[in-house]
Image (cartoon, coloured by chain):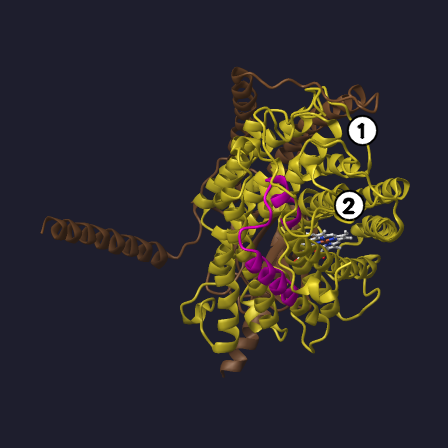
Amino acid sequence: MSTLKEWIFTTDHKKVGLLYLIGSLAAFAVAGMSALMMRAELTSMGPTITDNPGDYNTWLYFHGAAMILGFQIPALTGFLANYLVPLQIGAKDVAFPRINALSVWLFYMGIILALLTFVVPDPPDVMWTGYPPYSTITFGNTALYTFTVLLLGFASILGGVNFLTTIAFMRAPGLGWNKLNMFTWCTFAAFILQLIFVPVLGTAVTLISLDKYLGTHFFDPSTGGDVLIYQNLFWFYSHPAVYVILLPFIGIVFDIIATFARNRIFNYKAAVYGGIGGIVLLAGEVWVHHLYVTGMPDWIRVGQMVTTLLISIPVGLLFISLVGTLYKGSISFETPMLYALAVVFLMLIGGLTGIPLAIVSLTLHVSDTYYIPGHFHYVMAVAGTFAIFGGIYYLFPKFSGRMYNEFLGKLGFWITFVGVNVIFFPMMIVGVVVGMPRRYWDYSQFPAAEPYHHWMTAGAGMIAIGFTIVLANWIYGLVAGPKAPGNPWGSRSLEWTTTSPPLDHGNWEEVPKIEEGWGPYEYGTGKA
Amino acid sequence: MGGNRLYRALSTALLATASGLVRAAEEELSEFVPYEKIVPREIEDPAAGFDHLWYEVMVDITIIGVVFALLALYFLYRYRRRSEDEEGSQKPLSRLNIIGWALIPAFVFMADDFFLSANGWQLYDLYRRVPENSLEVKLESAMWTWDYTYPNGVKTYNELRVPAGQPVVLRMTSRDTIHSHFIPDFRIKEDSMPGRVTYLWFYPKEPGEHVVSCAEYCGQLHSRMYGKVIVMPREEFDAWYQAEADKQNIKLTKLGD
Ligand code: HEM
Ligand SMILES: [Cu+2]
């Protein structure tokens, strides 16, 4: 066992990764509780558990900001990337271990700053998007928002420098680009996006605080500013940000599915160069679909309708590869695989319900209604969470050396899986059929929405029960789980060739040798 | 020397283009008509167009979804693991297959994308071209109210009365922050904000009442920022409009005395 001091001052990529995991799960827990509060409030029309709309707005602010910036991005590009990438490329550590340690420290400071939301007298109430002019005239604490985003963004930029260098230069001898795991490829692509786009977000959120506290007028039209510049800057980053989430989570799902189907990735090259590459290329050309109803010029709305629809090509290629990997496989259904398959299902619903949202004329009705949270919880929030949970189960024997309980694993999975559908499908319906707008503390003007809200709250309750079982299972596994075999899933990938858990520094006694015919997905060759 | 001349030529060209753009923009703005008016032979209702296209897209995505889901379910059943040390037996694809399995689906998706774009664009045109005979009402939004001003100066708050059978166009701006004038029954919203004029139009055909509710987060009482559109029979509307004008103008002249 290592001491606390060793953990805090560690430069070992695996420990850094686990620190990211702990921090991001903490953010998930608090943001999840905010969600439960919101659902409780919305159970029936009128004030339900609070008659102060400000409370609701604070929960919603924290929920959105913490789930995205404090949970999903760090869990995927902090925990999974740190833990897996060096192991998957046969490296002894990342390129800059100390920068890595600095970035996890910044991440923790960001989380602490975010949590101050519940302590300061005038909590931020600008939603995770922080649009001016509201964010510059509110009594809420916009500075807290600015600094939380800046700290977490900076942590992520450091991660980007680190991982791009690591993947480009520290692969084991003989490990060519076409032998990389899908997860490593996706991490590479995600960090390219982070490096290009995070600075734009940093600029945007800095300018609102300058406007609010130092009296500049970037977004104030009465003195020559413009309110829409912010939204353009913000979504110029934040649309790519959804791919920063989507790519790594689809990457881990590829690895899990290949492992549990013991099969090669169907059309690996199309998935990597067409799918991942296509997403990187298109990511920066579609942001206006978040501004379809803001009065942007018609030509750019129509133009970005076309680019947005074209996203279906790379995503479609990734989908064909995911489903194709099952073809002629040898499929088993342990807990990590259930999560991975659920991600395919959730993304299918989430991705397809995104198609109407690309079509500008249809968004004139559905934009900013409950259809939107319904859609993006499917495609990003829940799919991403399930991929992260699947990844944790998948790596559980690796990082702990122990096994979780399979029955509890499946039980927790099924309860959560049913729960998310019970909450998020009605969300889409209430959005398009009743026309109920999002970010509402009360919906008395839409009485027809109430029955749907009963279902949604019930679904949220199921999710809470499911996640509690999952957490209990992990704690049980860590404390009392049976010893895990070295390679419990029979994977061919490099991370399973070392001991579980791997050596503290260096991962392997000796850097693994990559043979001619080896590949992480070369199954069915009789060389298990 | 040659480099210097090239540099000067380029910067002159650049400056000329830039000032041309600025002038064009100034002309554009000085007109200050935020929308294009058309004289349609027959007024088409965008809301009906919405319902039609929405239905079409739902059919489209349901088909794609069901195909993928059935295929995946079939594979999951057909290729389930039968013995502990069994492995998958997929062979690497030939070069031709790699390219085919990338390009053919890409073209199918692209065809669908273009089909949807074309339909979406057509409907969008309908939404954005305002019929000539529309009733133009000015809207100023504020935390947390909708203030309407009619052509003759009548003002109403959170209540937009309009005659049945005539299209209505709102020219919108905002006093404080961004709001969004959303009328679910007419399938239309557009943001209103300080410093810009935006517009939307809709076609109320039958008398009735419809909820208007704010769809852009605007602080504490965002969810309470709602009102109604009241569609009245033509004669009733005319009577109300005249009476309201008299009532409000009387107040004004009295103040002016
Ligand atoms: C797991 C259970 C979850 C539940 C029950 C839940 C529930 C909700 C609810 C009720 C809203 C408020 C909708 C509104 O008032 O407009 C919301 C918004 C949101 N959720 Fe979740 N959510 C969950 C998970 C997640 C996750 C994992 C993410 C990760 C990205 C996420 C991201 C968001 C975002 C970005 C918003 C929008 C915030 C905004 O409007 O500014 N949620 N969620
Ligand atoms: Cu509003």
Letter of the chain in yellow: A
Magenta stretch, overall SS: helix
Q: Nearer the viewer, residue A366 or B42?
A: A366
Q: CA distance from mark 2 to mark 1?
A: 18 Å
Q: Which residues are magenta?
A: A82-110
Secondary structure, mark 1, is loop
Q: Nearer the viewer, residue A38 or A333?
A: A333
Q: Identify the residue shown where x is 70% and y is 62%.
A: A7
Q: Quadrant of the N terminus of chain A?
A: bottom right
Letter of the chain in brown: B
Q: Residue beneath label 1, please?
A: A332
Q: Is residue B137 above or below residue A251?
A: below
Q: Identify the residue shown where x is 52% and y is 74%.
A: A212
User: Residue A516, position in %: x, y?
Assistant: 56, 25
Q: Amino acid at mark 2?
A: Phe
Q: Residue beneath label 2, please?
A: A396
User: Residue B214, position in %: x, y?
Assistant: 64, 59
